[in-house]
Amino acid sequence: MAVTVVGSIAFDAVKTPSGERERMLGGAATHFALAASFFDTVHVVGPVGDDFTDADMAILATRGTDVSDVERVAGGRSFFWKGEYGWDLNDRETLDTQLNVFEHFEPKLSDASKAADVLFLANIQPELQLDVRRQCEAARFVAMDSMNLWIDIARDALVRVIEAVDCVILNDAELRQLTGKPNVLTAAREVIAWGPSVVVAKQGGYGAALITAGDVFNIPAFPMETVVDPTGAGDTFAGGFVGFVARHVDSGLTRDVLRNAMAYGTALASHNVEEFGTERVERLQPGEIHARVADLADMTRFDAPALDLRSASGQPA
Amino acid sequence: MAVTVVGSIAFDAVKTPSGERERMLGGAATHFALAASFFDTVHVVGPVGDDFTDADMAILATRGTDVSDVERVAGGRSFFWKGEYGWDLNDRETLDTQLNVFEHFEPKLSDASKAADVLFLANIQPELQLDVRRQCEAARFVAMDSMNLWIDIARDALVRVIEAVDCVILNDAELRQLTGKPNVLTAAREVIAWGPSVVVAKQGGYGAALITAGDVFNIPAFPMETVVDPTGAGDTFAGGFVGFVARHVDSGLTRDVLRNAMAYGTALASHNVEEFGTERVERLQPGEIHARVADLADMTRFDAPALDLRSASGQPA
């Protein structure tokens, strides 16, 4: 039941209202793997440079993640992203992006990575996502992320990827832009018409919505007073969501499996933002995740009462 | 158990992607009353002009709402607001605001309005809210709304109102601005420290959060593919929320009462946006509201499973 993830392994420099870090381990594949490894064996596929140390690799390998497909490019430097978050953490400015070894990345998957039951195509060039999708013929559940850049400059290729996956995880602005539909529910149903059976609309600090042909489910972000660094929250969510599905892939994409996957993704994302980069999720314990999922279930639950409402006559109906 | 509401009764002109209306009945007190009247007798207090017809008054009086404190100002014109919504309905531009009879409004409450158990101070000048609050000494539950304008130009008076109410209903940007706290949960707890026991943070199309000293509850907006006109959604939410509390004021502000109030407010707001102005809620039936509340309960529910997660060793914990 292993999970393969293909995406960026990066160094991030980030400034938030809580402080700053010059160099921390980041990238979509990293955050995804740290979360998904709670559920299953993860194979990480992506390039790094000479600047990627054994200590960095050890973090990536947390909870037994297989890093043998992490390609060290001699003479290269790792992907680098620098950004700064505003006062209320709702917006961020990218100050620098250096593709470095990612510029000429050609995904080479080992047999073990190709054989995984579950595949996550993190946000990379759609042509590369399609290439990896084709290498993983055995995959029974394939999920993907993307971003506004690819909708702008490579929409046709992106749509071909979407047609070849089971689950699309995008934020609601991306879903609107992708489909040209201003309503997120309509946009999600358009995407489902292209092939996938599951759409997850991420809503940043507000939570996420799950849309399938037969279900709509909403879950809020876990409310917390201190958010240190939102970087990687979306990929950590994806890691929890896809990891949970991977553990239950034999029972099929039932409504309960997908809803619980949303809860575990949300719980993991909320832990991720408690500290900088991967710091918190590295040492996170299973009991902490379960407790947060239980809290989420509690803080969203209500039992509608029997109640006489008044009708147009002004009297109880 | 009657509810008194003091606020604007207006004519709105609105343009949305679905169409436009030149003159429709609106205003915070109107939308509030149309929703709250499902739960209890509502007394509406506010001024209108000569342009306010008997047909308009009949709509305001839907479900037995008492309009005897609606003051007709001879020679005056009703409050007028004109606005236009953007593509995805997430932002709106105010094109015109004419206070008209509202400019010299001095709330005069009948004994019946003063005697209500529950009071809602819709978004008006804080000094007027405080005046009304003092006239309603019998009120056992007082809720209020406000807006960024009053935080900008009358913050001291606004804080005095907040100190004198039980429940503050604001959107999350207003809560941040009011308290200077970028985190909504922290902002809500700051407001609770000023006196109120309940804070509702409205999140527009994303739903709303309820914060008390002992509870945090989140509910999404009801997902819908067609939103015709968001005008009045917040006041309709408040009408459902406060109306539900009014029906249960004898049992106290229990966790269940407040959570269910959030659900009824959310259901009513979702109906409000289905058509222009008050068109939909005027003819709404109790069964439609109950059905939507039941749908909301269903689409937010999950039952966290027992699950072995892997620990740092890579093995199940």
Image (cartoon, coloured by chain):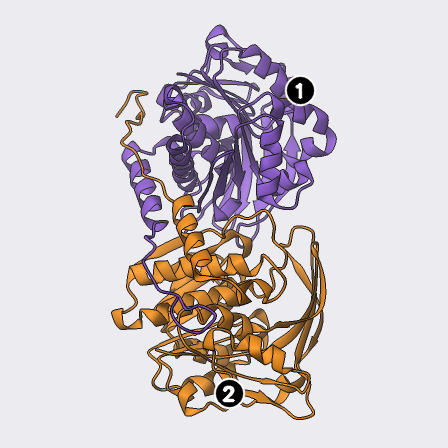
Chain colours: A orange, B purple
In the image, residue B186 lies at what x, y percent?
A: 60, 41
In the image, residue B288 lies at what x, y percent?
A: 30, 38
The residue that appears at 32% across and 62% down in the rendered structure is A257
In the image, residue A317 lies at what x, y percent?
A: 25, 26
Badge number at residue B127: 1
- Identify whether A54 is placed above or below B211: below
Q: Helix or strand or loop: what does disc 1 sit on? A: helix
In this view, the residue in front, B30 or A188, is A188
- Identify whether B291 is placed above or below B132: below
In the image, residue A42 lies at what x, y percent?
A: 44, 78
Badge number at residue A69: 2
The quarter holding residue B245 reads: top left
Quadrant (top left, top right, bottom left, bottom right) of the C terminus of chain B: bottom left
Q: Nearer the viewer, mark 1 or mark 2?
A: 2
Q: Amino acid at mark 2?
A: Asp
In this view, the residue in front, A222 or A194, is A222
User: Looking at this rendering, what residue extends furthest in the bottom direction?
Assistant: A74
Taking the image as drawn, is residue B76 in sight?
no
Taking the image as drawn, is residue A221 in sight?
yes
Q: Amino acid at mark 1?
A: Glu
Residue A100 horizontal side relative to residue A285, left or right: right
User: Which chain is indicated by disc 2?
Assistant: A
The residue that appears at 59% across and 73% down in the rendered structure is A27
- Identify whether B90 is placed above or below A2: above
User: Which chain is indicated by disc 1?
Assistant: B
The residue that appears at 43% across and 69% down in the rendered structure is A168
